[in-house]
Amino acid sequence: MTASLEDDKALEVIVIDLAGKTDFADFMVIATGTSKRHVTTLAEHLRERMKAAGLKGGAAFEGLARGDWVLI
């Protein structure tokens, strides 16, 4: 899914490997947007691409309404 962020011009995309360090995730991705609207668009596009890819688990999105930050 980092390709989605890069396609949408996210800045400073960082992938942190969590494999074997936690039970709930294999990796964490951190990215920066240039504005609230950009952050919101990054998250919305990522949600659409996750759904299209058939990823299951019902990812929750926090902070999407304000756009200051989004946690997925």
Image: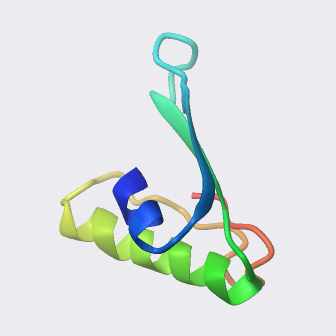
Q: Is residue 11 left or right of residue 49?
A: right
Quadrant the N terminus occupies:
bottom left
Task: Name the quadrant containing residue 71.
Answer: bottom right
Q: Residue at x 65, y 76 (%)?
A: 39
x 36%, y 57%: residue: 3
Q: Quadrant of the C terminus?
A: bottom right
Residue sitting nearer the eye, 31 or 53: 31
Say whether residue 71 is left or right of residue 29: right
Residue 9 vs 71, above or below: the answer is: below
The answer to whether residue 50 is left or right of residue 22 is left
Residue 25 position (above or below residue 49)? above
Between 65 and 69, which is closer to the camera in this rendering?
69
Q: Quadrant of residue 36?
A: bottom right
Q: In this image, 24 relative to 54: left or right?
A: right
Give x and y (percent) for residue 56.
Answer: 28, 53
| Residue 34 x/y as whole percent | 72, 77
Q: Is residue 1 visible?
A: no
State the residue in front, 58 or 63.
63
